[in-house]
Amino acid sequence: MPANPAIIPAIQPLHAMHSTRPKVWSLAASDSGGGAGIQADLLTLHDLGCHACTVLTGITAQNSVALQQLEPVSLHMLEAQLEALNQDLPAQVIKIGMLPDPASIQWLANWLGQYKENHSVFVVADPVLASSSGYQLADDALLDGWRSLLPYIDLLTPNIPELALLTARAEASLTEQVQLVQTLGAQAVLVKGGHAEQLDTIVDRFYGGSLNFSMHSPRLSSPHQHGTGCVLASAISAFLAQGYVLEDALVLARAYIQQSIASGYATGAGPGALGHDGWPRSNQFLPTIRCENWPEAPALPFAALSSELAVYPVVDTVQWLRQLLPLKPGCLQLRIKTGSHTSIELAIMEAIALSKQHGVRLFINDHWKLAIEHGAYGVHLGQQDLLQADLTAIQAAGLRLGLSSHGPFELARALQLQPSYIALGHIFPTQTKQMPSKPQGVKRLADSVSLCGGTPTVAIGGIDQRRFNQVCQTGVNGIAMVSAITKASSPAEALSYFKQQWEQHRAYHR
């Protein structure tokens, strides 16, 4: 019998569909109360756009008040689950939670050692060594098992008591304890600060070798915080699987936890569960980041922009300014990277005079002393250049400050300094300079705009006529361009086109 043509169109797309969600394996125990363990992992990973595969390590009988009983799965079943996933559903990230059986931990250590030899996978481990209700898991055999697992862990996320148990060095400093677990094999460690004595602030400390920093978040008063460790480790895993570098994943996961605690809800007589409200969208949930040499936040914000940045050409010579200034772009940036001090100063002096003559705002890239001395509208700094700048002097001179960012970690650091605007990039591949990070794309740009709150934003990197309207729709306050104007057959026509497109977009969306 011939197929019914009426149903073929409905069947074919379903048959042809393939998931584009990255896969994360969660190895954890079941929480029958639904607030932590494998249940919390599933909710978090799905909420953040991943496909969650599960390897059940144990079954608990618990509710919101207490963990009453725990039964490990058999070693045979643990192995069968992992092999089934390995055959068909390879993971970008493996998240490990409760491992209740020392023998299973030892077996898992051997399995992971072999697996990582042939697979590029990031392993996040949250060492659940006691329940919040006081149920103890950590006998000597279990702790020895966890220590054997450390060489295969890329990120370990213990709280302060768990770190002391793992090291058996409760009298040592936090740094010494971290150094010990790193000596035992853990690549990086995030020490969660929820058990510390600070009443109003939670401080999570990250130790990653060349990059060490702390994240400071207000301690929220909600009693419904069951499963925070599971959710944090799963959120980190989700962001890593989405392609974020580790420091960006940590910042986003911390923001996700704050957002989830804020929407926590009661489930029974004891502490309730965390909410799961999707990608973090508000800068109120971003942590304050402290790291070596990063300047303290000023008491007041930098001077505000007189109007939105709009179309924002970035050029490297005064000749370009002479050509573009009469066309009245939203603003301009002069970025000179080579030349003697004298030649650069002469160029900046002429550029500032020309910008004032045409009534167009001019930002000077990097050369903040000359920008102050000759009265520029503002200064734009990359985060490395910012470390050598005198922010107090720039602010006292009344100059606007623009800061670059290449991901959530740098974005959070930049927001702390209350700049006049933040540049988000690079959005698409660019040939103007070698970039240390991957292109963000339009979706991540829109996410970053949301996290900036009321701080103006400008998008930069690889934006041309084909992509301009997509970028406009993310809500940025300006679009910076280099090659799309300077390499156009008619730079003046290109700038006029972008101005027209911007004004049409703003008129429609006001």
Image: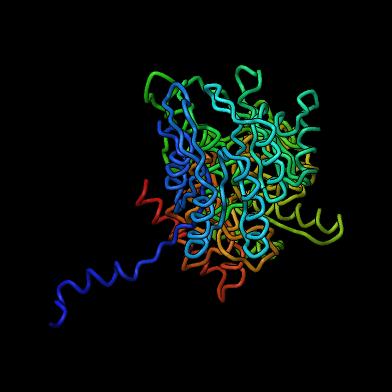
Residue 423 horizontal side relative to residue 20, left or right: right
Residue 507 horizontal side relative to residue 182, left or right: left
Residue 297's x, y, as percent? 68, 31
Q: Quadrant of the C terminus?
A: top left
- The coloring applied to the image is rainbow
Residue 40 horizontal side relative to residue 352, left or right: left
Q: Quadrant of the N terminus?
A: bottom left
Residue 445's x, y, as percent? 51, 52
Residue 241 against residue 431 in the figure, above or below: above
Residue 25 against residue 182 in the figure, above or below: below
Residue 27's x, y, as percent? 53, 46
Residue pictured at 38% horizontal, 24% vertical: 266
Residue 320 against residue 377 in the figure, above or below: below
Residue 269's x, y, as percent? 39, 18
Residue pictured at 57% horizontal, 45% vertical: 96
Decide if residue 86 is in sight here.
yes
Of 264 and 184, which appears nearest the observer? Answer: 184
Number of labels in the image equals 0
Splitting the image into 4 quarters, where does residue 205 fall? top right
Of 470 and 20, which appears nearest the observer? Answer: 20
Residue pictured at 63% horizontal, 52% vertical: 245
Of 26 and 486, which appears nearest the observer? Answer: 26
Residue pictured at 29% horizontal, 67% vertical: 14
Decide if residue 420 is in sight here.
no
